[in-house]
Amino acid sequence: MAKVPLEKQTLLNVNGDEAVAWAVKQSLVDVVAAYPITPQTIIVERFSEFVANGEVHTEFVAVESEHSAMSACVGAAAAGARAFTATAANGLALMWEILYIAASLRLPIVLAVVNRALSAPINIHCDHNDAYGMRDAGWIQLFVENVQEAYDTTIQAFRIAEDERVLLPVAVNLDGFFLSHTLENIRILPDEVVHEFLGGYRKIPKVKVDYLEDEVPLVLNPARPLSFGPLDLYDYYFEHKMHQIEAMKNVPEVVREVNQEWYEISGRKYGDGVLETLYVEDADVIITVLGSTAGTVKHVVRKFRRDGKKVGVVRIRMFRPFPHREIAEVLKNAKVIGVMDRGISFGSYGQSYLEINSSLYDYKEKPMLVNYVYGLGGRDASPELIEKMINELLSDAERGYVENKLRFLGVRE
Amino acid sequence: MLEVRWHGRGGQGVWTVSNLLAMAVSLEGKYVQSFPAFGPERSGAPVLAFTRISDEPIEVHSMVYEPDIVVVLDYTLLGSPAITHGLKKGGVIVTNFEDEPSKIYDVLGISRGEYRIFTCPATKLALEILKRAITNTAMLGALLKASPIVSMDSVFEAVKERFPGTIAEKNIDLIKKAYEETREVK
């Protein structure tokens, strides 16, 4: 597809939630089923305005819970629809049962998760424990850094999900308030360019079924009856799980291709789509981070570089499937890695720390790891706190050992 | 990068005016960010909003800790140490204030020469023009007098995009009037 020059891309002043709503508006989505929850509510509000104004063909289903929202998306996607929903925190927790079903039925649903801390105590602000909680459900998980990327990634998510090498649902994660309620000026592509990028409406893969002669579209259709997810015990369940495992292996390649193609059209890309790196080549200290905090870390790291300090950043854009080999290759030559997690697995470490630790295990020479748990319940990751963290890591690198592998950034003692 | 911190009370349109400034600047091709100090809105409680403006894409996604400019929509907040907290040395305070300008130092609890201070009788002007004590757009006019961050025309365009017909017109009148009546405290 041809490149769309910047002056042909409409300038919008929108917050992260609105950016997602615009992306969904342009993505020829057939069904949106959603239930409001702060800080995701604006997505659903804006999108229902598009529906009410007749600007989209979408069937909007105002359901009575998030469990129903995901259930409605499962039904719609199984019937061949392109389906979208959005939620946060406790709403995502209520979806949990159906998240597994969506992934296991290989339904290419797109879900915007506006990251928010889980109760109790009740808190509406950002952390990543909601997303980490769906880590094992079989979904692709992408994390965005800014409002522009929230728009870009939501559109890309439909392409990734529907790719026949993948056929898995995608969760697009954006930080509650830090992105959802922050206005930034972004560029959006013309509708027809987005339509072409997505290949028009959702294409249904065809499958061979042993009791029918022709290949049939993989959808619920009374004229060509198929079953989705019927009883499957120790006879075949394991083999079906292997299909999910195999499909996940194809994801990084597809995410990279889509990132590259998007770049050719829009002029914007996010690292290689999987990881985004800054100053890692010669770095003694590398920070790994997900979401909007990555921007603040980059900002601070540039200051350290100006002072001649060898510090780098890796932003993990794709958390599931986790890019173990790719991240290990980037990190292996540094002295110390500071792994930032806006979440924790109680009784263990932060969730991305566990992944990075296993990524490096097989290397003979490897950096020391420190896990920084930060920002729970929306506590701000200020440039000052990030500077403090980097200074600690620089001392660790100089000293050659780390005393405390699990540190809490910005918490009262 | 320029960072502006807006002080007001819930219901006074603090976030709205931060967005208006961002929208106006965006029209002139710069990068912007605008966000509230996040929390459930409570009418009357002190609230903050922040605007970041830059020629480069803005990477930072934390709150603003060391603003270049502070704008105060509600003069009853002036006694609070929060007003000058973190404000850069030589920074600018633009405030709604109708009393004798020289009294501002005592009200703020600061000495002369620490900051540049501009005052605007925003409540009086808002009551005259809008017939309501909503001072957010008046203080945007006052801000432009203190610091020409963006052209008046871009601000008017943003106001027209945000508000319907006569409401936009009245707010534009208010911005012009507030601009004229804003004075630097010498």
Image (spheres, rainbow, N blue to C red):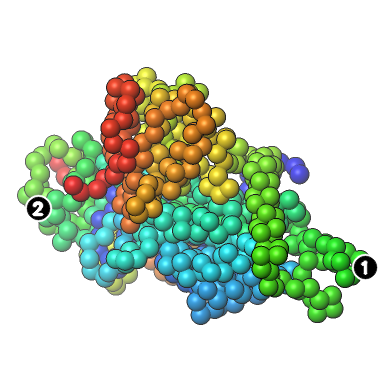
Instruction: Point out residue B117 in the picture as x, y percentages from the top left corner.
Output: 19, 45
Subunit under mark 1: A
Q: Is residue A264 above or below residue A190?
A: above
B153 to the left or right of A69: left
Location of residue A244 by image quarter = bottom right
Tell me the residue at 70%/58% (across/down). A239
Q: Amino acid at mark 1?
A: Glu
Residue B42 in view, yes or no: yes
- Comparing A244 with A86, the one in front is A244
Q: Hey, which residue is sitting farthest front in the picture?
A: A234
Q: Is residue B76 left or right of residue A304?
A: left
Residue A408 lies, in percent from the top left, at: 29, 44
Q: Where, by quadrant of the figure, is residue B74 drawn?
A: bottom left
Type of amino acid under label 2 = Val
Q: Residues within 10 Å of mark 2 (few under 14, many from 20)?
A: some
* Point 55% across, 45% down: residue: A322
What is the quadrant of the N terminus of chain A in the image?
top right
Image location (x, y in percent) of residue B52: 38, 45
